[in-house]
Every structure is written in C-alpha cells, then in structure tokens.
Image (spheres, helix red, strand yellow):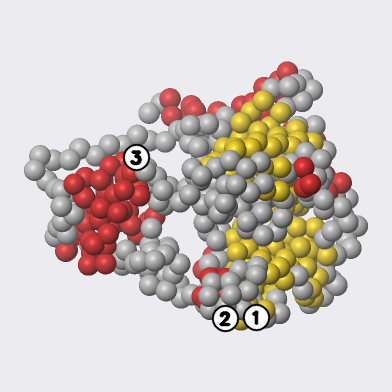
Amino acid sequence: MSALRLSAVRLALVVAAFTACSSVAWAAGEPVTFAKDVAPILQEKCQACHRADSIAPMSLVTYEETRPWARAIKSRVVSRQMPPWDIDKTVGIKHFANDSSLSDEQIDTIARWVDAGAPLGNPTDMPKAREWPKTNVWNYAAQFGPPDLVITSPKFAMGANSQDAWYRPVTDTGVEEARWVRAIEIRPTTLKGRKITHHAVARLRQDDGFDDAAARATRGSDAAGTPGLFMEWAVGKQGEIARPNTGKLLMPGSKIVWDIHYHAIGEAITDSVEMAIYFYPKGQEPKYRQVLGQFDAITGGRQNLDIPPNSIAVHQAFHVMKQAGRIENFQPHMHFRGKAMSMEAILPDGTVQMLSHASFTFNWHLNYIYAEDDAPLLPKGTVLRITAWHDNTAGNKNNPDPNQWVGWGDRTVDEMAHAWVNVTYMSDEDYDKEFAARKAKLTAKASSAALR
C-alpha cells in the first residue's frame, strides 16, 4: 500500500471539527427562564422519552410538569447521566448522526436556571409545543411513508414471575421478488411489551449466492452456519437507515429467525415484536451492500469469557477486514456487569486509530451512528480490535452479586461482550474513489473554515 493511500486513510479517520463558534452572554440581571431558555432544550433533547405514554418515568413537556424535578434535572445533566450518551468525546470519532447529548452551553443553561430558582419567565416566550407521533406510528414513516412490509413474530406469553425466556420462532417474509432495503425498525407491539422485552434480534435466512466471506468473519466466533444478522433492537435504539446508495437485500423465500429475550416484571404480559421494512423504489438498486456484524470482544469463543468475583476483567478480540469497507456505527452489548467497550482500527502499516470508546450502562443499549463525513473508511486488511471491560465488584451498583464467578450466557445475570456494527463492504477500486471524494470534501471544509 502506498504512503499516499495510507495518509489518506489517516486523514479520513480524523474527525474534522469545523463548526461555527457561538457563545451566549447573559445580560446583567436577566434571568435564565424555562419559557425562553430551558423549554427549547427539553424539546430537542429530552421529550422524545419524557412525555406522556413514553418510556420515561415523568413528563417534561410543561413548566408545571418540569418544575418539581428541577434539582434532579440539574444533577443528572451536570453529571452527564442524562440524556443517555456514553461515548467518550475526548477520543476517537466525535461527530454522530444521532447525537442526543447536551452541549456544554446547554448544560450551563439548565444549571443557571435551577440556581436562579427555576423561574417560568414570560409565558409568551414558550416555543410551540412539539407534535409527537402516537405510539402506534412508525418513526421513519414521516420520512419514507408507511412501511412497505411489516413482519410480526408470533405472540409470546410471559408469566408474572417466570424465569427469563428466549423465544426463537421463524417467520416467512412473504417477499416474492428481490427487494433492496433502505431502513428498518423493530419494536415491541404494545407499550406493555416494552416492559418485558430486553432485546430482539432478527436474523435473515436466505440463499442469494452472496459472497459474504467478509461478513461471515464478523458474525461472532460461534455463529458459523447461522442465519445472517439483519437487525437488532434494544431499549434506546430507534432503528437503522442505510446511507445513500447503500442497502440490505431481501430475496424471495427468505425467512426471519427471531431471537427475542423476555424477562418478567411481576405482571403477566402477552406480546410480540414487529419489524417495519422500507424498500428502495422498484428498479433502484444501491451500489453497496451493508452487513450487520457481531464483533466479539472474546478471543477463542464464548467459553473464554471469564470474570472472577470482585474484579474488573478485560477481554479483547481481533477481526480482520477481508474487504475494504465503511464502518457505519458502534453499538456495545453487555449485561449488568458491563463497564465499557472500545473499537480500534489497526491499519495495514501497523498504525492504530481509536474509533470509539464508550462507557456502558445496562439500561441503555445505545447505538452510535457515525456522521456522514466521519464514518471511517478502512482498507482491506485492517484489523478491528474490540476491547470490553466488565466490573464485577460491589462498586458497580447494577451488579446483582459481586461474589459470583461470571461467564458467557443469555441471562442478564450472565455476561456478553460484543459490538453490533454495520459495515458497508466495497471493492478496492470503489474504496479508492470513496476516499478521494472524502478527502476532497474535508479539504474544502478546511479551506472554508480558514476563510471565516
């Protein structure tokens, strides 16, 4: 590989921060108010969950609903516990398409408001209330129209005090001709179902002659002979939208092999999981095929996940990219004892690039989707190193029992260690073209920023 090409690789992995700087100078004696300053932040960053009939325990839509929680809100946002966004912003890629975190300025605004007594301010300053979709409306319908296909798993009855259950039925897709997929959503069918559904994996079983040697290398060390990954859902994940000219392929006769993890909550609930699929228009075929990979952090197979009592354990594994590709996202997956996970790229010349490092909180299975100009383009032969940290000590408030020796298992009291990563594979020729376009775009941005 030429020095020029490796230089381009490094350039593409550097996150360009060309944003206009802005600051707010608070006028002397002018208080920060809910109506003028805080409500817009809550609308943008919080109300997707904190509203009636959503997943959060309280609504933060009106002043009357928000005011009693003012001090708790300050505590959570200043400590960056809320909104949930656990990526380390000091290393690796820093720009994400779905960044839900608060800026330093927004945190300062909320803190000032609480310190000033959490005043309402002038009600006429209140922004217009956001209109949120009903719970039975698909998130991407506003962008693509109604789903082209909805596949529903058979219903499952979860007892009030049952052991965890893993439901693995098979459902025909009903597809009669090859169709390219541009977006997918998965959700429990009912609001009650969200209380018992820990996660749902949809695997695609089909015979399409696709040469997926590169994909098979990222399905996990114990996944040989299993259907390919199609989509995964857990609390905090909305769905997946393929980048332009990229998609997944559904073939006639294909089947979805579900893997749904249910857990009891003290109430008997019967529910199912449904998956909405949005197709490209007929005749429109994307150039690149995207593959969802399960990148393990356990070398040698699941049996090697070994977490002694009262300890912090570190595991890692290496995955060779047998084709060039673009890394689209990073989504760590662990259980109660999960502490953190990182993904690094070891380039063919031995250079190591940190892509992402994130703390892990079991209540939030966050999917970090890289921004368009920041999704790393990597050459064939790159090694992806996945490292996982587990905290099996009493200091981990989520730990059910620090005196237990823990290994791999489906139960939440057992552990896992892998990242769900979508990879768009491409030929070396296409990789070179994509890199040239990326380099030109970054150079133009840098030139534009220098002139400001």
Badge 3 density bin: few <14, some 14–19, many ≥20, Cα 10 Å: few
Residue 295: x and y, percent?
A: 72, 45
Which residue does the image show at 53% across and 67% down from the upper left?
A: 139
Of 134 and 154, nearer the camera is: 154
Q: CA distance from mark 1 to mark 3?
A: 45 Å
Q: Quadrant of residue 309?
A: top right
Secondary element under disc 2, as helix, strand or loop, is loop
Reading the image, the residue beneath label 2 is: 268
User: Disc 2 or 3, which lies upstream in sequence?
Assistant: 3
Q: Amino acid at mark 1?
A: Ala
Q: Quadrant of residue 46?
A: bottom left
Reading the image, the residue beneath label 1 is: 157
Residue 437: x and y, percent?
A: 65, 35
Quadrant of image for the N terminus: top right
Q: Which mark is residue 104?
A: 3
Whether pointer 2 and pointer 1 mark residues with C-beta atoms closer than 8 Å, the reply is yes
